[in-house]
Amino acid sequence: MPRSRIVIVGAGFAGYQTARALSRSRGLVERAEIVLVNPHDYFLYLPLLPEVASGALEPRRVSVSLAGTLPRVRLVLGEVSRVDLDGQRIAYTDPEGRDGELGYDRLVLTVGSVNKLLPIPGVAEHAHGFRGMPEALYLRDHVTRQIALAESEPDPERAAARRTFVVVGAGYTGTEVAAHGKLFTDALARQHRRPGDRPGWSRGRTPPRWVLLDIAPRVLPELDRRLSRTADRVLRRRGVEVRTGVSVEEATAEGARLDDGEFVPTRSLIWCVGVRPDPLVAGLGLPTERGRLVVDEYLRVPDHPEVLACGDAAAVPDLTRPGEFTPMTAQHAARQGKTAGRNIAAEYDDGEPRPYKHHDLGFAVDLGGFQGAANPLRVPMSGPLARAVTRGYHLAALPGNRVRVASDWLLDAVLPRQAVQLGLVRSWSVPLDAESPEVARVPGGRFGADGGASGGGRGGAGG
């Protein structure tokens, strides 16, 4: 008998874990073909992306090979543009622009999320997001370049603008980008010390300025207040200007005007305000909840039992909090992916599907240096202990490259970072406009003030 075909759209946290769970079911592998459709041949471990942007980790450390870790899964490189639910087919475009189609017997939609844009003049033109590897590499080059240009800038005001970095959104991404970025730029500025300058900030020179903005009343508004206070204290002691209850009113090439009337001269506006479900979901014509595809507790789409959805793109009932849906986090996306894979395998083995039910195990925020904030199993921690717990969690959660990541961390602790501009990604190749084809091909997403941590690109690297 011909084998049936299971198609997974997106290789983010949910998609990757779905494929992994399916590939480990030997009985299913013999009876069904598992196909993973994704624009890139890697799974991006998004929580460590701020360390790539700040030069602590090399890009390939957080990029896990799909072919190398999913040997029983067929990878199709492509960006999904359309789903024909009645005909049980998907349409996609490969990296060379060629169109293709795939039929399916089972479909798992994990298309993730895209940037959440607000109707603020100038933001799409002058800000850059932080949702994928290209954006992280661009930011690392951009920050390094601005510090170097500031040192040779004869106009003090323009030099100060180049040394000013504004991060909008104090969720996971914004907090970690500001925390790591401040340490990175301070180190860069010290390397550019002029002959005769004493160690430290002498002769009127000041450290680079980082400003973290959020309309919410506190940083990390989605987390426990104790973690929020810890992060706020670390940022302020490090020299980051934390501005809560404030947002951007207008962005220009010269800087950002805040809604309290202040104008902040800067060449670096980093947009981390959150994510929203991928627009592909809206095109399905199925019931949604705030843009997320409605599913039942078994992750099945109503009226289409052959289709499952999970991650940022799915509104999954939270059985631990009746009447609510699970938040858009990597923790939920990964576990939903495992549940989806096991439930599909159960169908082939005449087993019983299991509902998705998961209690949050806590959260961890890496603040760089020896600082962190975490509450594993609801036990609040801060400082070096929290940092150790955070790194231990990441090493355990990484599906590959653990030794390489640990080696980079060790080298970073004993050697200065290599701060050079590689010039691999130009600003026009990472626009903030989430609807553009360029961003649709960028693997993505994580974080933001709404806690989204698993999204990514239309039909691609989704959570």
Image (cartoon, rainbow, N blue to C red):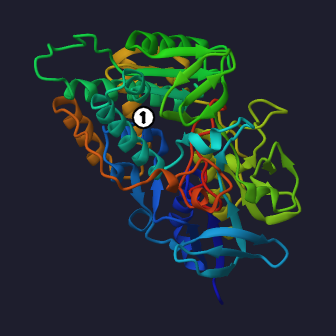
Place residue 276 in its image quadrant: top right
Q: Give the tally of numbered discs.
A: 1
Question: Left or right of 132: which side holds 142?
Answer: left
Q: Is residue 109 left or right of residue 41?
A: right
- Measured as percent of width and height from the top left, residue 114 is found at 65, 48
Residue 108 visible from this viewpoint: yes
User: What amino acid is at disc 1?
Assistant: Tyr
Left or right of 438, for residue 313: right
Toward the front, the furthest residue is: 154
Tell which of 450 and 30 is nearer to you. Answer: 450
Q: Toward the viewer: 443 or 408?
A: 443
Q: Is residue 119 above or below residue 362?
A: below
The x and y percentages for residue 455 are 61, 48
Q: Position of residue 341 (x, y in %)?
A: 62, 59
Looking at the image, which residue is at 64% across and 81% down? Answer: 100
Q: As displayed, is residue 451 above or below residue 81?
A: above
Q: Which residue is mark 1?
A: 393
Identify the element where label 1 is drawn.
Answer: helix
| Residue toward you, 351 or 180 | 180
State the residue at coordinates (53%, 15%): 242
Q: Is residue 457 left or right of residue 407?
A: right
Residue 131: percent from left, percent from top: 54, 45
Instruction: Count neighbours of disc 1 (C-alpha within 10 A) and say few if under 14, some if 14 to 19, many if 20 or more.
Output: some
Is residue 10 visible in the rendered structure shown here? no
Q: Residue at x 45, y 51 (%)?
A: 133
Which of the image's four quarters has the N terminus?
Answer: bottom right
